[in-house]
Image (cartoon, rainbow, N blue to C red):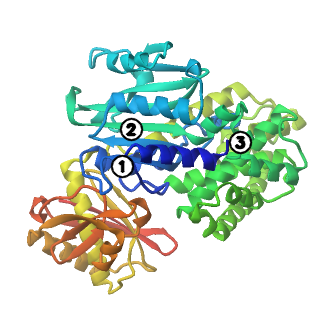
Amino acid sequence: MRRKELIKRYIQFFISKGHKEIKNSSLIPENDPTVLFTTAGMHPLVPYLLGQPHALGKRLCNVQRCIRTGDIEEVGDPFHHTFFEMLGNWSLGDYFKKESINFSFEFLTKELKIPKEKISVTCFKGDKDCPKDEESAKIWESLNIKNIKFLPKEDNWWGPAGKTGPCGPDTEIFIDGIEIWNNVFMQYNKNENGNYIPLTQKNVDTGMGVERVISIINNTGDNYLTDCFKPIILLIEKKSEKNYGKNEKDTRTMRIIADHIKAASFIIADGITPGNKEQGYILRRLIRRAVKYSRELGNNFSLSELVEGVYQIYPEYEIISKNKEKIIYEIKEEEEKFLKTLEKGMNLFKKLTENKKEIECKDSFLLYQSYGFPVELIEEECKKRGIIFSKEKFEEECNIHKELSRTATQGKFKSGLADNSEKTTQLHTCSHLLLEALRKVLKDNSIIQKGSNITPDRLRLDFNFDRKLTDEELKEVELLVNTQIEKNLEVTRKEMSLNDAKKEGARGNFEDRYGERVSVYTIGNFSKEICAGPHVKRLGEIKGKFKIIKEESSSAGVRRIKAIIT
């Protein structure tokens, strides 16, 4: 089976069960600033999982592009990858455990023809906070599934996303011992006191990785032998004149290159460029790791030549086809910059080891982290010069930094839109006022949001503009926002078709995230935006004065404003 067939079957199956398909959202989360990237299909749905009505109803499904960076170092085996597609179906306060488990069982056994004897499951074993999930186990038993295990929270529990919020037990489905699907049952709310309170709106959130399912169905034992990766692998083989599968070292190297170039292509397509912060840093790290490993294959080709393979796998992603030249340019540019950095690193290596019998741990890690030296290159150069290199001490240093990196990529902030707090809601409403105020003060109706990040402490808004704002302009923007707040304007929400929203003059550059029906928020006669985040009902609920604390460049042609409520 090919990936497009699996996705088509999945979506059609859930549509037949009363679900509506939602669009595949950007890799850059709009509604959850607690993470750098969209790591699961539920991220674009955070406001709806917290109770906000969705324009398409209570039963939803889709395939979502995702990035997970916590295990970059693990990429290279047959199963790990940074970019993946996740199939998901959701119930927003509609059906619950029985229907969810039955849907999963029917899809696996009838649509994918997987014998039920191959299926095993795990359920939550219970603890002092919440009871054992006997309900899920009994549903599986009624389907004649014999192999059922009960596991603790670390294995069979999801959430909350922050310190507080929706959470609940999950049931994981395995085929021949390999996890294939996870059904999460959000039935509790963890409050500030650490108590788990049953939710009024109980949700279902499921996730199933496309690449893993294709590998299981086709019995490849290697995700990189499926059509989710094969076109890139074939290009690497052709350009390196080496064969995938011939030896473990080259095979691992090819997997890393294929994974990183695919992930980098999608990140660039979603508007990120290589840099030293946040998503830009992860992108730079992926490209530079791919460059390092390509040197092991002979380095006789540019990594940008592999973008064609990404396009061949995902022709239906318009975001890839329309940004193909940009992707090629950014990868090539970063590759060339990094090769020069490697050259500088080699000169530094010579200085650091001059007249020395052993290279210090901090120096070897500097070469690895800042100049991109693979550990094998450090070993090789030390061996040439008869210098002692302690791989054990080096790996200890790497593990410390790896843990810091994992923490940073799993949760940038302590909380965010995911908590739907009063402060977050106030600041999110302010972001609408700020955007419209910028258009009016700068007399530029082409200004749109290029990104946002909102926590209970501050808002951050990125917008397209080609110069620094003057102090006078910033004061005028601030005054205009506060004037609207003082007017206590009403904030209304209306569901309508995307076409009707455009006809009414609603703004929004995230249209592809919401499908055919959208939520339009109108603030008096001041602002009208397509949005899915939390809002106050009247501006008088915003307690305090809106204050801009910083204005700076975010990237070429994009400015960034940070603001608070004082």
Q: Which residue is mark 3?
A: 226
Mark 3 neighbour density, 10 Å: few (under 14) some (14–19) many (20 or more): many
| Mark toward the start of the polypeptide (1 vs 3) | 1
Quadrant of the rendered structure where residue 269 is?
bottom right
Q: Which residue is mark 2?
A: 205
Report the disc number at residue 45.
Answer: 1
Reply above or below: 173 against 10.
above
Mark 3 in CB contact with mark 2 (< 8 angstroms): no
Q: Amino acid at mark 2?
A: Asp
Q: Amino acid at mark 1?
A: Leu
Reply above or below: 427 against 559.
above
x, y percent for residue 276: 55, 56
Quadrant of the rendered structure where residue 130 is?
top left
**Which residue sits at x=62%, y=47%?**
5
Which type of secondary structure does the marked residue at label 1 adopt? helix
Of circles 1 and 3, the one toward us is 3
Which quadrant of the figure contains the C terminus?
Answer: bottom left
Mark 2 neighbour density, 10 Å: few (under 14) some (14–19) many (20 or more): many
